[in-house]
Amino acid sequence: MKVVVIGGVAAGMSAASKLKRTDQNTEVVVYEKGSFLSYGACGLPYYVSGVNDDYTKMIARPREKFEESGIETHLRHEVLKVIPGSKQIMVKDLERNRVFMESYDKLMIATGTRPIVPNLLGRELDGVQVLKTLEDGIAMQQFVAQPGVQDVVIVGAGYIGIEVAEAMVELGKRVRVIELGERILKTFDQEITDVATEELLQHGVQLNLGEMVQAITGDGKVQGVQTNKGSYPADLVILSIGVRPNTDFLQGSGVALARNGAVIIDREMRTSVEDIYSAGDCAEVYSRVMEENTFIPLGTTANKCGRIAGSNILGKHEKFIGTLGSAAIKVLGLELGRTGMSEADAKRLGIDYATVFVTSGDHPKYYPDPTPIQFKLIYDKRTQVLLGAQGIGQKGVVLRIDIFAVAIHAGMTSRELGMVDLCYAPPFAGVWDAVHIACNAAK
């Protein structure tokens, strides 16, 4: 059997590797548009900032290792079209500028997302960049190292925008973030983002919220940004206003797509077309807590679902247990983490919910350097079943969010988690941990 994989980063290489580990006789061919395979894109802001000084450290497994295992890989090859009727794909070799047809028995689509680049005047100027691929990271790291690059404007205040803002602060740049919405990091609730906003302001980041970029100005090279409220100097403009599924090539293929272009799959990673599977950021995914398909582009989910796809392509029927949308971000001196539903999710689903927002400590005050931790819990008002948790603090937050993730995954109540036997020692936690305190405040 011949399996063609489109996309060679998280889900694609997880599927390809699983296929070869399970059945060495399966022919596996990978087509990747970019120049690198299997890298951790979440590490890009830390490469740009210099925390990591070697981009090869982000590559999980070198191309040579995949080839040694029997996986045939083709870099700089873009798939232009999928033709299920003849079980073929149309491929463009970007280096040789030639187009050819490739056949398959089964197909895996793992093309991820691409950055949204608005149709702004000046978007083509030198110094307008995005940060999505390893190539983007290398280009940005080189550009920002130029001595003339001092004023950095970031358009968009989601995960990437805020992580890049931190990177630029670390590099000593003057940083401005322009966001159309009224607050940053909107996957978190306002109680959490208010604290993160103050942290950014204290580190000199200019936050222009509720403001729309209208044009990027300059003569060949970026010089500034014009918005509906003013104009600002810029030597570098980073567009981070979101991503969309990289699925345009599937138009006319019969593969069902959601309204945003994400591939619609079932919990076995099957698409609407026989023998075509999909996973990763280009596809929807099943939410365990909301019990519906949703679009949550996360590397953790992509790797899990890619592995499941690899098994099921070979005849298994493994079902994805579902995502909780667990995610974390470092914002200068603070950790933020979230899992499960936000309050907006609970409201949208018509759940009779309640919330608590609790401040406690990462360890007792009688041990040196205690720091505050703040948790918000969303739970079913009648049953007290936990639905979501979010937290912020200087240390000890994200790993505690992992505790909440396990509890939500297992359908636990706040009362049950409030009595779970967690570790206690003064350097690490109080006899009542911050997790206990938050849960026992949920009534």
Image: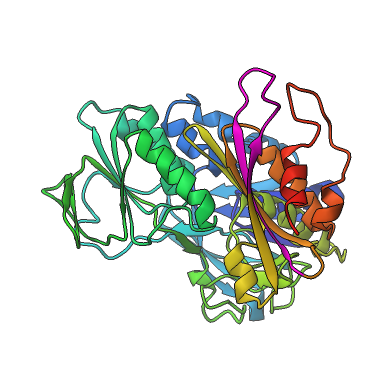
Residue 293 lies, in percent from the top left, at: 67, 72
* Magenta span includes 105: no
Camera-nearest residue between 117 and 271 = 117
Residue 182 lies, in percent from the top left, at: 38, 60
Q: Quadrant of residue 226?
A: bottom left
Q: Indicate left or right for 423 with 136 as reference.
A: right
Residue 23 shows in this picture: no
Going 23% across and 33% down the picture, which residue do you hit?
Answer: 149
Camera-nearest residue between 430 and 317 = 430
Camera-nearest residue between 198 and 20 = 198
Q: Indicate left or right for 329 with 242 as reference.
A: right
* Magenta span includes 363: yes
Q: What is the quadrant of the N terminus in the image?
A: bottom right
Residue 29 lies, in percent from the top left, at: 67, 54
Image: 136 above or below 143: below
Q: Which residues are magenta?
A: 358-381
Q: What's the coloring here?
A: rainbow
Q: Quadrant of residue 227?
A: bottom left
Image: 99 above or below 139: below
Going 48% across and 44% down the picture, which residue do you hit?
Answer: 195
Q: How many marks?
A: 0
Q: Indicate left or right for 398 with 313 as reference.
A: left
Q: Indicate left or right for 327 with 193 as reference.
A: right
Image: 197 above or below 188: above
Going 84% across and 57% down the picture, which residue do you hit?
Answer: 412
Going 29% across and 31% down the picture, which residue do you hit?
Answer: 173
Residue 226 shows in this picture: yes
Task: Name the residue furthest top.
Answer: 368
Residue 443 lies, in percent from the top left, at: 76, 59
Image: 242 above or below 72: below
